[in-house]
Image (cartoon, rainbow, N blue to C red):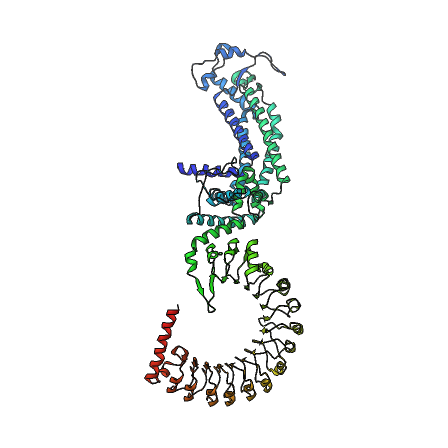
Amino acid sequence: MFTGTEIKNFFNGCSLFRILQPWWDVFSHYLSIVMLMIATLAGTLQVSQYKILCVPCQVASDRGCENPFSLDAVLANRTTAGSSASSRLFLPKEVNNLDLQQYAYIDAMCYEKHLHWFAKLFPYVVLLQTLALVVASNFWLQYPSSSSRLGHFVSILHKCCDSPWTTRTLSESVAEQRGGQSTLFKCSPVKPPSSAEDGNLAGIEPIGVFDRKEGEQAKAIFEKVKCLKVQVEENDDIYYLYRNQILAKGVILFIIFAYIPYATTCISFDVDCVVNIQALTGYQRYHCVHSLASIFKMLSLVYVIFLILYSFMCIYSLWWIRRHSLKQYSFASARHESSYNDIPDVKNDFAFILHLLDLYNPLFSKRFSVFLSEVSEKMLKQISLDHLWPLKKIKRKVVRNAQRKVELRLLLLSGIPSAVFDLRELEILKLELIPVSRFPRKVTQLGNLQELWLHYTATSLDSAALQFLSNNLKILRLKCTEVDKTPFWIFSLQNLRELHWYGNLQPEENLVFITGLTKLKNLQVLSLKNALPSIPQVITNSLPSLQKLSVDNEGTQLTVLQNLKTMLNLTCLELLNCALQRIPGSVSSLTNLQEIGLNGNNLRTIEEIISFQHLPRLCILKLEHNCITYIPMHIGALDSLEQLHLRDNHIASLPPQLFLCSKLHHLDLCCNNLSTIPDEIQHLKKLQYFAVTNNNIDELPDGLFLCKMLQSLFLGNNNLSVVPPQVGELVNLVQLDLTENQLESLPAELEGCLSLRASGLKVEERLFNSLPSSVKDRFRGSQKEQLNQCESDC
């Protein structure tokens, strides 16, 4: 047995599907109900009335019964004493000498053998035909492979219509169209909207902000609509089911009309019955009347009229299918009536269902479109984000960097919280791994913003924000992996001074981006990390103000470097990881160069540095992470050199000419094959930074300790067995690294390094304990003073 709740839920589920039935389907449904009523009425009459009444013929001929007994006499003499069928068929013996059983037998024989089948089975035929049409009309709603998807769609639609987010979005659109301020609304949970509702939506009340529960519900609906769209758009079996059901109804109607008109004419009131039962009754021919013939004929005529109307509905539905593009649904009206123009057109079964929904109530499809709009979804995410990141929480993430600039770093958020644009003192904004970041008009409040980081972050701006960034932004650091994620609005930043772009795009995609660089006329620093086959001519010829060019080719060989000669204003050139075999000769033509960086290449020899003597301003030379085996003697000709970086090479010895570069104050020789340090190092009177970590040095020359300006000395991972006591003469020493050597103890003269603190001394614990107690106490005391100073500064 079914419970009342189960029956109620069943009928509620059936009623929900009505929104997917157009008006002709609904009209056909009511026609089916009327036809079922005709079948029920005919069946009731057939049970409650005489089926057939027969009397014998006294005189019979080929034309029929010539002189039957008077029907009036027969009926007058039939008893009405009882209500049973047998008593109603009684005929007195003085009329024809037949008894009750004989009359019942005659009626039954004539009814079965001589009454037309349609006259007998009219109620059942109408019932079966109507049931067949009803099944054909509703089969597509109950088909196993599609009914679950239809039910899922209807349930989600119900949630979309009841969601406060839907009404809020539509009401904001109405306010925008009327030129007023946007007002936030909340749906009434009473009933779904009717077709009479328009822009002035019923059952809404103004609210200020969504609460968290409503926001979570709206986000859940967005995800469900996305999944439903993917699921339903993949196929079109629902559309074909609906079309085939119309064809099936057409076949059923064709079969019905093939016999119904003829069968209707066969319903007759008078029936001539000839049965060979003369031995039982004494008569062979009988005259019968079908008491329901007139009613059945009238009902069949009405039934045919309804069938004709039903046929017109099928023809109209077929015409509708052929006339409309049911494989594609456009939200043109929804776009026109809302502020969102990103609502996507849908196809296949999803389009077909929305066509049916639009016929039922256009407001439903308009409400549903809100949850297909990416802009609407982004707005919802923005509201949720603002709930999670208020201004108080954002301020806790603001720091001052080493340059004492106010900096904010946001990582792995769904967007930019609105509170960020209230930090008027912000100077650097770092956005990393944020899928969607939008800069609204409020960004104009950040008057101090000069540097922006966009690392794997998609961005969009309105016109006011773009104008503001164009005037204020000086530094942009951009990382992306796909060309469609590249914010091409950056080419509108007229005052941009530095652009650092890191990507991994194909050469043809690079060209699109690099060509746009010509619009940045004030660009001074350009840093590219990409696989470029050559330096584009656009860069060398169309950026007159460029002073620094850095190209990290990620191991791809960079060729055709002759066009570098035209970049006469360059002061810094870095060609990193470009698989260079030798130093490009065109570099020596850039007479304004102050810094050259050739790190991460395949340089084995650097004999070409002899041409650097024509670069009078060259002061920094970076040749790290190469395969250089020796330093040529003519390096001494670079008398303006101040920094030399030769980390991670294969250098075994240092030529004395190196120390003719008397202006050197930074010398990095870590991770090489050095075994000795020449005593000529004493000529580097300005040396402040000296690093030979990870070499094979076993002895320190006395000349090293004559470099009185040394501040950083890195000697770790060598073969030193003793540290000379002259180390105490380095009174400016701030950093000293002696780890991973063969030292047994440290000299007590370290006490003379007045600038050295415990934090700057890197040695093993046992070596530190080998120092005299007074020296250790001084280091520890200086460390406490430094910590207190840091706390007071903070």
Image position of 16 with respect to 503: above or below:
above
Q: Is residue 724 visible?
A: no
Image position of 375 with respect to 125: above or below:
below
Q: Nearer the viewer, residue 366 or 423?
A: 423
Q: Nearer the viewer, residue 725 or 264?
A: 725
Q: How many marks?
A: 0
The quadrant the C terminus occupies is bottom left
Question: Which residue is at 46% across, 54% downward?
Answer: 385
**Residue 204, horizontal then vertical, whole percent:** 46, 40
Q: Is residue 710 left or right of residue 62?
A: left
The quadrant the N terminus occupies is top left
**Residue 449, horizontal then vertical, whole percent:** 51, 61
**Residue 459, horizontal then vertical, whole percent:** 54, 57
Q: Is residue 182 visible?
A: yes
Q: Is residue 159 left or right of residue 525?
A: left
**Residue 556, horizontal then vertical, whole percent:** 60, 71
Q: Nearer the viewer, residue 715 or 545?
A: 545
Q: Nearer the viewer, residue 749 or 44?
A: 749
Image position of 591 with respect to 729: above or below:
above
